Image: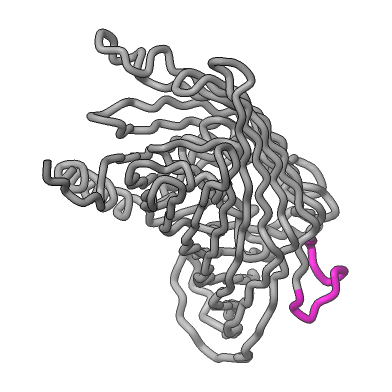
């Protein structure tokens, strides 16, 4: 286990060095950023399916009731790299970003309960958008450069407990925190001074999620699993300062402040309604599993003193449908390494709820992955996802993305007293 922990630390350090920019999507401009997938690499590789699944040596973040099944201490860490192609109908741009995904530890408590805690990204902000304005003769007369970075994280602790043979309940509490920086640089031709609007804000809040799972055998080999988890409504406070100043119009990235014309504080509240996830699946333990998941939520609301008509974006109802599963040829094979590997695949369609220029932003992805067994019950998890988001209409952009995810799941026996025989 010591060697595994050392390897994990090296892995974490490498992730930290890579994760200088955690998002490059123009859609992270809105609100407090793009929502991160609060899922493990294993779940994401199955199209985000996970609400009904539980394992004695694998963490599943969707439903806290799954922690009741833990029988080994499990250490999980992951990161991802995203390659993005952006199409605005006229031009195409490409970019990439690397980011930390999660760090978590779960362990059993007796024979009927388990606990997990860790840290995960909650939202991510990372965009650079250039707007060019031409006159009637198609001569460039003005540019607006929008940039932003930051996001929020969540520190969580969850508890699951078995009630009877087949029924489990769970609860998870999380504290959300982070900071976001946005700026708008306006430059006009033949004007010696430019202006820049900047805002720096801190986001904080908390959330609670509850879940239940039920499983029963329908034959000697087959087990049916169901799960329901509910994220209770919560509020996130966004407080910060907004200021505007002029600068000498030198071009490039040079910023030479001249006069401050605005300096004020602001406060806004993001109200998240109840989010419900329904899951069901069937499979043979340590062999295969197929699951279906449906998630839905009412519209998020923002209280910032502005009417909806004063914004270019709004929120509506969101929902997600996912289908996925895994297959392990022979869990305990001693003759073939690849028969012990676990292969995953899935699809997912999500209406994000974000409305920009009265256009709904939807997301469709196809995912697959493989768990490469290490010594004992530990795994290296590789995940891949191809997808598309948004559309080229009403001044919006279409994104085609490829996500590569790498995770470690280290399972062993901890916290057990030595027995004298």
Closer-to-camera residue (319/24): 319
Return the x and y of residue 322 as percentages of the image width and height.
67, 33
Taking the view exactly as shown, the residue that stands out farthest to the left is 421
Q: Residue 141 falls in which quadrant of the image?
A: bottom right
Return the x and y of residue 262 as percentages of the image width and height.
63, 90
Would you place residue 224 above or below residue 210 in this image?
above
Instruction: Quadrant for the C terminus, please.
Output: top left
Please name the residue shown 65% across and 36% down the image.
226
Closer-to-camera residue (334/318): 334
Q: Which residues are magenta?
A: 303-314
| Whether residue 326 is visible | yes
Please name the residue shown 70% across and 57% down the image.
139
Taking the view exactly as shown, the residue that stands out farthest to the right is 309
Q: Is residue 305 magenta?
A: yes
Return the x and y of residue 363 as percentages of the image width and height.
69, 39
Taking the view exactly as shown, the residue that stands out farthest to the top is 335
Q: Residue 308 falls in which quadrant of the image?
A: bottom right
| Whether residue 28 is visible | no
Going by the image, does 107 lie left or right of 87? left
Would you place residue 124 above or below residue 350 in this image?
below
Closer-to-camera residue (416/9): 416
Return the x and y of residue 85 as percentages of the image width and height.
57, 38
Please name the residue shown 42% across and 12% down the image.
329
Q: Tell me, what colour scheme is on the image? A: one colour
Going by the image, does 405 lie left or right of 4? right
Q: How many marks?
A: 0
Taking the view exactly as shown, the residue that stands out farthest to the front is 421
Instruction: Quadrant for the N terminus, please.
Output: top left
Q: Is residue 100 magenta?
A: no
Would you place residue 219 above or below residue 322 in this image?
above
Please name the residue shown 25% across and 48% down the image.
414
């Amino acid at each position: 286990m010591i060697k595994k922990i050392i390897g994990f630390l090296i892995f974490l350090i490498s992730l930290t060095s890579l994760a200088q920019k955690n998002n490059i999507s123009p859609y992270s401009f809105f609100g407090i950023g793009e929502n991160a997938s609060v899922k493990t690499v294993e779940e994401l590789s199955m199209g985000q399916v996970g609400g009904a699944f539980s394992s004695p040596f694998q963490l599943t973040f969707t439903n806290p009731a799954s922690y009741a099944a833990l029988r080994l201490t499990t250490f999980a860490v992951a990161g991802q790299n995203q390659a993005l192609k952006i199409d605005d109908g006229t031009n195409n741009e490409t970019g990439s970003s690397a980011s930390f995904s999660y760090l978590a530890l779960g362990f059993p408590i007796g024979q009927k309960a388990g606990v997990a805690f860790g840290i995960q990204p909650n939202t991510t902000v990372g965009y650079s958008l250039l707007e060019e304005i031409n006159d009637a003769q198609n001569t460039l007369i003005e540019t607006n450069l929008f940039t932003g970075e930051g996001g929020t994280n969540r520190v969580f602790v969850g508890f699951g407990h078995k009630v009877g043979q087949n029924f489990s309940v769970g609860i998870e509490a999380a504290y959300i925190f982070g900071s976001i920086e946005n700026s708008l640089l306006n430059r006009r031709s033949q004007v010696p001074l430019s202006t820049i609007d900047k805002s720096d804000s801190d986001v904080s809040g908390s959330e609670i999620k509850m879940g239940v799972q039920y499983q029963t055998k329908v034959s000697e080999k087959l087990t049916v699993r169901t799960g329901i988890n509910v994220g209770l409504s919560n509020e996130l406070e966004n407080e910060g300062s907004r200021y505007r100043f002029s600068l000498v119009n030198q071009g490039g990235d040079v910023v030479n402040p001249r006069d401050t014309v605005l300096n004020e504080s602001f406060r806004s509240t993001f109200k998240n309604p109840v989010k419900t996830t329904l899951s069901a699946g069937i499979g043979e333990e340590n062999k295969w599993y197929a699951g279906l998941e449906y998630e839905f939520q009412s519209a998020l609301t923002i209280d910032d003193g502005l009417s909806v008509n004063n914004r270019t974006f709004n929120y509506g109802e969101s929902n997600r449908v996912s289908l996925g599963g895994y297959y392990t040829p022979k869990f305990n094979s001693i003759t073939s390494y690849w028969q012990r590997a676990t292969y995953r695949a899935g699809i997912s369609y999500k209406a994000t709820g974000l409305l920009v220029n009265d256009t709904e932003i939807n997301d469709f992805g196809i995912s697959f992955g493989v768990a490469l067994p290490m010594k004992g019950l530990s795994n290296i998890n590789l995940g891949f996802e191809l997808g598309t988001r948004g559309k080229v209409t009403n001044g919006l952009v279409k994104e085609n993305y490829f996500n590569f995810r790498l995770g470690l799941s280290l399972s062993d026996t901890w916290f057990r007293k030595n027995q004298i025989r």
